[in-house]
Image: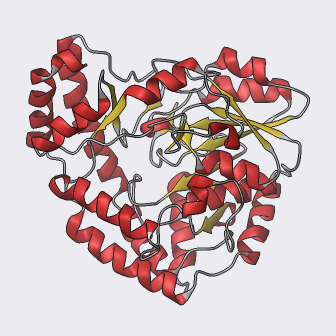
Amino acid sequence: MAGNIERYREEIGRYLGLPPGHVTLFWKGRVALYAILEALGIATEDEVILPAFTCVVVPNAILYTGARPVYADIEPVTFHLDLAKVETHVTNRTKALLAQNTFGLAPPIDELREIARRRDLFLIEDCAHGFGGAYKGQKNGTLADASFFSTQWNKPFSTGLGGIAVTPSPEIAARLRESEARAERPTLREAANLALLLQAHKAFARPETYSMAIRTYRALSRRGLVVGSSEIEETTGTERPQAFLKTITETQARVGLRELARIDEYNYHRRSIAEIYTRALAEMGVPHPVEPTGAEHTYLKYPLFVKNRDQFIEAAAARGIAVSDWFRSPIHPVMSGWEKWQYLAGSNPIGEEKSARVVNLPTQPGVSPKYAHRVVEFLEAHRGWL
């Protein structure tokens, strides 16, 4: 009988319509991205174009290979790569283009694939926010040369920590399997620590306790007392952490099997909550996310742009409303010293302006329609901040 890890691999492949051998499993989503970059042969002096509205672990994975991240500005309505800007960044060193499912909003893959084809680039899809979404009827992650997903705490479905790399290419799949085969196993301490955190997550993953739980988790992980989503060196430097390339545990796979069976239910719930926000914001005349023809968004988070973010979040918390703040900078959560990640301040004005103002309204399971309407009442009462 196959163990949890192989069953999990098979179920992911079945859901995405890919052979199990085209699915590889890693400790974190960023590790899956790193494995993809290696599988594509990306190395020193190569360049990878990515949006200037992302998490620092993405450029870090690029830097760990010796390659250079090149940041392109985003489109102000969809928050995806501005296609015209992408073209201006392509050089003879460019090897790959990275599309991103920002907040679970599906990117324009057809247009990006055409740029990649014309410029002889690999296309990678960052589906960390987008498991279960689709573009023109095909699942996110199945249309690029290779794609990765994250199953960390705040992702479409969670195994605590976890990463998935997929590809339609047999050649790339073979190289990804080689990476998975030589990856280290998590230590017994890491596995046990994560198992305890998964139990705690069940108890505290509610809207009313979300903010407190996140603050506590981040404080404990900074002190090294629990397994953190990010090691401290990942947000302060660009050197690859020791034992970075790791696989997943049987516990993660067991939880993943249970959660994967509910992903369509989770995404239907998020979309229904997002509809409540969209209707209300449209009635107020406030800009809101758009869903282009053919895109099926999952709305992992619902982005909103406000005039004074810290004041807005504080006022929401006082009303018992959980509002989060992805992405606080073009390379979240880094707020200064961007040049360390080869980012030049002022180079991407739209990404920088959006990251200075964005908040995320909650959509996760546990957010009831009644709770969403409370959020709407709060927005109506603070319309002047929108």
| Residue 18 in view | no
Question: Which of the pair 89/26 is nearer the observer?
Answer: 89
Q: Residue at x 48, y 36 (%)?
A: 102
Task: Report how many numbered discs are placed on residues in the image.
Answer: 0
Snapshot quadrant of residue 377: top left
Question: Which quadrant is the C terminus positioned in?
Answer: top left
Q: Residue at x 86, y 50 (%)?
A: 43
Can you give x and y, in whole percent of width and height, for residue 33 in the image?
A: 66, 54
Q: Residue at x 56, y 53 (%)?
A: 235
Task: Determine whether 377 is above or below 34 in the image.
Answer: above
Snapshot quadrant of residue 268: top left
Task: Determine whether 325 is above or below 7 in the image.
Answer: above
Can you give x and y, in whole percent of width and height, for residue 260 in the image?
A: 41, 62
Q: In screen coordinates, is 148 left or right of 230?
A: right
Q: In screen coordinates, is 359 left or right of 382?
A: right
Snapshot quadrant of residue 281: top left
Q: In screen coordinates, is 95 left or right of 9?
A: right
Can you give x and y, in whole percent of width and height, for residue 244 in the image?
A: 67, 69
| Residue 203 in view | yes
Question: Which quadrant is the N terminus positioned in?
Answer: bottom right
**Residue most toward the front?**
337
Can you give x and y, in whole percent of width and height, for residue 87 in the image?
A: 75, 19
